[in-house]
Image (cartoon, grey):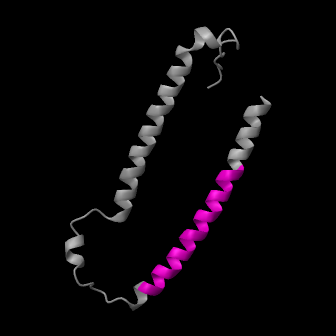
Amino acid sequence: MAYTQSVNRFADRVLDGVRQVNGTAVNVASTVSQKIGDVLPEELPGATALRSFPRPEELVKTYWDFIERLVKTQRTYALDLAKAFEPITGKIWKPAVRSKAA
């Protein structure tokens, strides 16, 4: 379908742009972090209390694992809702045919 292809091409361009911006931000953050890390002492005062918290990577992974599960749940909900309206939408569009290739 032309509409779907157009949307997918646009989405690809948006995601490419987001990846470029993200890459630039990570490079800048890494450079700045390295410079600051070079001047900080090996043991930061008060850092001992922070060691009881999860590392930043663990927090990020936990958060995004939840978001992925949430998006999957919402995708299923949206598709189920679209299917629930099929008695009406079927009068406008033919019911979707499932592809056997998998």
Q: On the image, which quarter does residue 36 sit in?
A: bottom left
* 15 magenta-colored: yes
Residue 57: percent from left, percent from top = 38, 62
Quarter of the rendering containing residue 88: top right
Residue 38 lies within the magenta run: no
Pick out the residue farthest to the right: 2
Q: Is residue 60 left or right of residue 18?
A: left
Looking at the image, which residue is at 31% across and 87% down? 42
- Above or below for 4 versus 91: below
- Magenta segment boundaries in residue numbering: 13-36
Give the vertical position of 76 relative to 89 (above or below).
below
- Residue drawn at point x = 61 percent, y = 70 percent: 24
Residue 96, given in percent of the width and then of the height, sits at 65, 16
Q: Position of residue 13 (x, y in %)?
A: 71, 51
Most common secondary structure along the magenta stretch: helix
Where residue 1 sits, quadrant-wise, is top right
Q: Residue at x 42, y 89 (%)?
A: 38
Task: Give residue 5's position: percent from left, percent from top.
Answer: 75, 36
Q: Quadrant of the C terminus?
A: top right
Give the residue displayed 80% in from the left and 32% down from the top: 2
Number of numbered callouts drawn: 0
Q: Is residue 55 left or right of residue 4?
A: left
- Residue 40 lies, with reference to residue 98, above or below; the image says below
